[in-house]
Amino acid sequence: KMAGCGSTASQPETPMDATTYLRVQLSFDAAAPMHLDAARFLLAVTRARVALTGDVGAADPVALVHYDHERLEATLRVPERSAAQLRSALTVLREVEQAACRARVLVEASSLASLAADSRGFLRRMAVVAESER
């Protein structure tokens, strides 16, 4: 033990929490298209989590990784331990800004790479690249 230093006993390192990525899409019943910016989309998700589990249950962070405002589709990052709770909250989401809606989890993955590989758009782009290389 060096002078001025604390105990030499090693403290166990806390591993980083595993992360889950979800691609989520909102669809609305209204005849007029709904326009939501990224902040309002995330607010709707947060309100659904709070409605289901309360403030404490919704305390784990949800990060908005990507948002497509035309398709009302977002890629969200959550701690793995919160993924089931987020999916549950999305199933009870029925209204955003007084408009009836439905949330769908399109893809769930443990990494952005596997999320992209599961995407239909990714597969279409790969098919186009393969076709152009012939």
Image: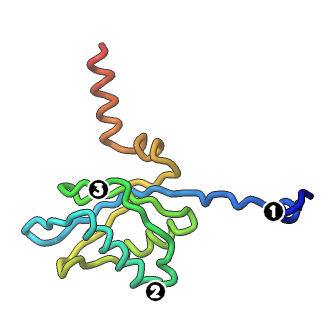
Which colour style is shown?
rainbow
Identify the element where label 3 is drawn: strand
How far from the left and from the top, in percent, is residue 74? 32, 58
Q: Where does label 2 land, which residue? A: 54
In the rendered view of the protein, which quadrant contains the N terminus?
A: bottom right
Q: Is residue 111 left or right of residue 36?
A: right
In the rendered view of the protein, which quadrant contains the C terminus?
A: top left
Q: Where 122 falls versus 84 (above or below)? A: above
Q: Earlier in the sequence, mark 1 or mark 3?
A: 1
Distance from the alpha carbon under mark 2 to that under mark 1: 34 Å
Q: Quadrant of residue 12?
A: bottom right
Q: Where does label 3 land, which residue? A: 67
Distance from the alpha carbon under mark 3 to that under mark 2: 25 Å
Q: Is residue 75 left or right of residue 108?
A: left
Distance from the alpha carbon under mark 1 to that under mark 3: 40 Å
* Residue kind at label 2, given as amino acid type: Gly
Q: Residue furthest top?
A: 134
Q: Where 115 falls versus 93 (above or below)? A: above
Q: Where 16 falls versus 36 (above or below)? A: above
Q: Where does label 1 land, which residue? A: 11
Circles 1 and 3: CB atoms closer than 8 Å:
no
Identify the element where label 1 is drawn: loop
Identify the element where label 2 is drawn: helix
* Residue kind at label 3, given as amino acid type: Tyr
How far from the left and from the top, in percent, is residue 101? 23, 73
Q: Earlier in the sequence, mark 2 or mark 1?
A: 1
* Residue kind at label 1, given as amino acid type: Gln
Q: Earlier in the sequence, mark 3 or mark 2?
A: 2
- Determine crowd level at label 3: few under 14, some 14-19, many 20+ residues with C-alpha closer than 10 A: many
